[in-house]
Image: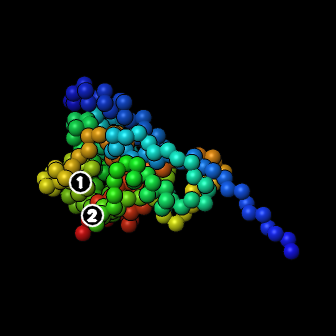
Amino acid sequence: MVDAETCLALDEDEHAAREAASESGGVLERDVADRAVYWLTMHSRTDPVETYFARIAWTRYPDGPPSVKFADAVSGRLDVTSAWPMVPGYRPGSYDICQPFTAEGQAVHPEWATGPEAWPATGNPFLWVVTQLLHDVADRQQGRSA
Amino acid sequence: MTSQSARPKTRVKVTVTFPISPRGPFHSEEPDDATIAAVRQAAMSFFGVAEDGQHAYYLTHAGSQVTDDVTVGEVAGHAKAVKFTLVKELIQG
């Protein structure tokens, strides 16, 4: 269970993230059971029938990056490689995203903790994470993982 | 000889958000033939970021990347205002 401060900060920033998702045809939903978990439904721009479900799980916000994984549905399984889009830096086989906006990426690259890839606790990092995911699925995706 | 009158330029209100910046959004008013490259450069200057060999910066609109050669008018269509997001991307080898 996350602390109250995290929940309050998420309450404050989620509106802009939800709006960004909606503007791109996606949906951002808060998990029913865990208020620190969100589900982002996104569609490929080249093939709008292709839908991806990202689980964004915060442990402390805005001070730390979220765990980001793809599932086969909202609240679905997280161990399905075919739920993942093929995007540079995304590793379906490891169920992680090796990018600075994820806890998994920051864990793999401890050198990112300082310097230009450090987690930015300023502004609206939730919106940043959602924007990165939307952009990756819309513009950088090279199909679905097997 | 008939002279063709130039089409009057429409001005479009532009807002660029950079989510991780402590500053608020960048606002400007641009002619509809201004390029996205010009808007991106102005926004990056406002947010105090610069291109380097490790990062790429793009503007996105409605979640999708807008290339530098597109004009503000092409994105805005008939709208008088348009919103973009500045995206910083790590170039991975």
- Which residue is farthest bottom? B1
Pointer 1 chain? A
Residue lying at 31% horizontally and 51% vertically, measured from the top left: A70
Q: Nearer the viewer, residue A34 or A102?
A: A102
Does residue A137 appear left or right of residue B75 in this picture? left
Question: How far from the left and from the top, in percent, is residue A126?
Answer: 33, 41
**Residue B8 percent across, percent down from the top left:** 72, 56
Amino acid tagged 1: Pro
Q: Residue placed at 26% from the left, 44% from the top?
A: A120
In the image, residue A6 above or below residue A107: above
Q: Which circle marks residue A116 in the picture? A: 1
Residue neighbourhood size for the residue with mark 2, other residues' Cα within 10 Å, grouped as few (<14), some (14–19), many (≥20):
few
Real-space CA distance between mark 2 and mark 1, rounded to the nearest whole angstrom: 10 Å
Q: Which residue is mark 2?
A: B54
Instruction: Tell me the quadrant of the picture where the N terminus of chain B can be found.
Output: bottom right
**Residue B89 picture quarter:** bottom left
Q: Is residue B52 visible?
A: yes
Query: At 25% from the left edge and 25% from the top edge, which residue is drawn?
Result: A4
Query: What residue type is disc 2 on?
Result: Gln
At a point 25% along the width and 55% down the height, the residue shown is A99
Q: Residue furthest left?
A: A110
Q: Quadrant of the C terminus of chain B?
A: bottom left
As helix, strand or loop, the secondary structure at mark 1 comes to loop
Is A3 above or below relative to B6? above
